Amino acid sequence: MATQAKRPRVAGPVGGGDADPVAGFLSWCQRVGLELSPKVAVSRQGTVAGYGMVAQESVQPGELLFAVPRAALLSQHTCSIGGLLEQERGALQSQSGWVPLLLALLHELQSPASSWRPYFALWPELGRMEHPMFWPEEERRRLLQGTGVPEAVEKDLANIRSEYYSIVLPFMEAHPDLFNPRVRSLELYQQLVALVMAYSFQEPLEEEEDEKEPNSPLMNYLRMVATQPIPKGHEIFNTYGQMANWQLIHMYGFVEPYPGNTDDTADIQMVTVREAALQGTKVEAERLLLYERWDFLCKLEMVGEEGAFVIGREEVLTEEELMTTLKVLCMPAEEFREFKDQDGWRDEREEDSLTITNISKLKASWRQLLRDSVLLTLQTYATDLKAEQDLLSNEEVYARLSCREQQALQLRYGQKMILHQWLELTS
C-alpha cells in the first residue's frame, strides 16, 4: 500500500498499561487471528509520527501485508453492546450515520475488560489531534481564511453538537451502567469523531455479496496488500485517495508540502461567478436578466448557493457545471430565451473543454468571466501570493513558524498557485 502523504500527527497511548504497547498489541494480534507478514513490523522507529508499519524486507506489489478477521474489527456490530445498539438502531439514526460506532467506541474505551485495549494503546493522544476543528476559532480563521476549511469545520462542529446533545448524551444517560460519567463529554465525542474521520473505513459492498459461499476467505478477512514496491526500511502508508490539501487537513490534520500533492485543487464558489457576472451589468434590466439566468442554472442543478467549482492543476473537475454556467451567463439574451425554452442543451465540442491547454480557445466573454471570478476568489485570502512565496523561500523564518502555521501556509500557497495559473491562462 502506498500514499503520496506522510502524516505529521502526534501519537501516544490512550489506554492499556503495557510497558511495551507494541508487544502487547502483537500478542493481541495472535490471539484474535490477525495475520501479519513477516516482512513488516509495527514500530515507532523509522516512522513519520507515532506508531507505524515498517518494511523489514523489500515488498513487491500484490504481496499481503496483513489480514484482519472481521470479528477483530471494532464496530457497532462486534462491540460488547452490539445487541443494544442494534435494538435501538431507529433511535440512533443521524445525518452522519456514525452514532452507533461512536457509542461503541465510547463504551469500549472506558471498559477495562474491552477486547481492544491493546489496540487503544497505539492510538494517537486524543487531546493532541491536529484537525482544524481543535484549533481556536481565531487561529483557524486567521490561518485558513479563503481556503474553505473554516466554513467546513463550522458545519462539522454544529452537526457534532446537535448529534451529541439530541441523540448521544440522552442514550448514555438512559444507560448509566454502560457509560460512566467521564465519557459523557462533548469534547471526547468530538475527538472520537475526528478519530473516526481519520482512521475508519467503509467497505464497498458488492452486488452479489449474498451469493458468495458463507465460508469464503474474502468474506471472513479484510486483506491489505502492497500496490507498489516498498524498499526495506521504508514506512508503509495507507493511501488516502485523490484528495486536495484542504480535504487532507480537514479530515486528517495534515497537508502535503507544495508541490507534492498532484491532486490539489482550488475552489471558486458558485456565487462568486454570479458576483463576477453582476459586475458587468450596467442597468437594472441586465441585472434582472442575470438573476433569471442564474435561477435557470439552479433549475438545471448546475449551481447552488453553497456549491463550488473545483479547479485542478490541469483541468476543471466540475467541468460540466462550470461550462454550462459560463455558456448561460455569457450568451446573448435572445439565445438564452431559446436555450431556456428547450430546457437546456449540451455542446461537447472538444475546443470548449476546460483544460489548461484549451482555455485559450474559449470565447473571450467566457475567459473574462472566469478571470473575474478568479480575481474575486483571490481577494478572499488574507495575504497575497507574494507574501506566501517570501515566507516559503526564507528557510530560517519558515522554521520558526508553528506546525499549524506551516500547514496552513502550504495549503494557501498550493491553492493560490492554481488560481494564479488560471489567471494567466484567462488573460
Image (cartoon, helix red, strand yellow):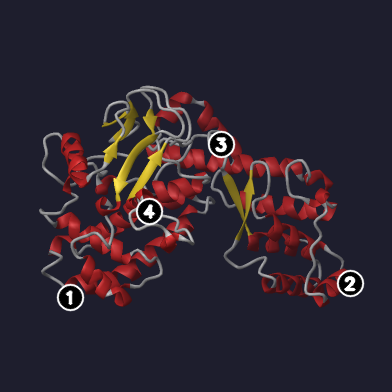
Q: Quadrant of residue 186?
A: bottom left
Residue type indicated by callout 1? Ala
Q: Which mark is residue 197?
A: 4
Secondary structure beneath disc 4?
Answer: helix
How far apart in space, not on screen, are marks 4 and 1 (Cα)?
Answer: 27 Å
Mark positioned earlier in the residue sequence (4 or 2): 4
Q: Residues within 10 Å of mark 3 (few under 14, many from 20)?
A: few
Q: Secondary structure at mark 2?
A: helix
Q: Secondary structure at mark 1?
A: helix
In this view of the protein, can residue 379 be seen by the observer? Answer: no
Decide which of 404, 215 is in the foreground and name it: 215
Label 1, on which residue?
174
Name the residue that disc number 3 marks. 387
Q: CA distance from mark 3 to mark 4?
A: 33 Å
Taking the spot 37% from the left edge, 62% from the top edge, the residue there is 157
- Residue 334's tag is 2
- Tell me how far mark 2 sits from mark 3, CA to CA: 46 Å
- Identity of the residue drawn at 81% across and 44% down: 360
Work out whether residue 200 or residue 338 is closer to the camera in this orientation and state it. Answer: 200
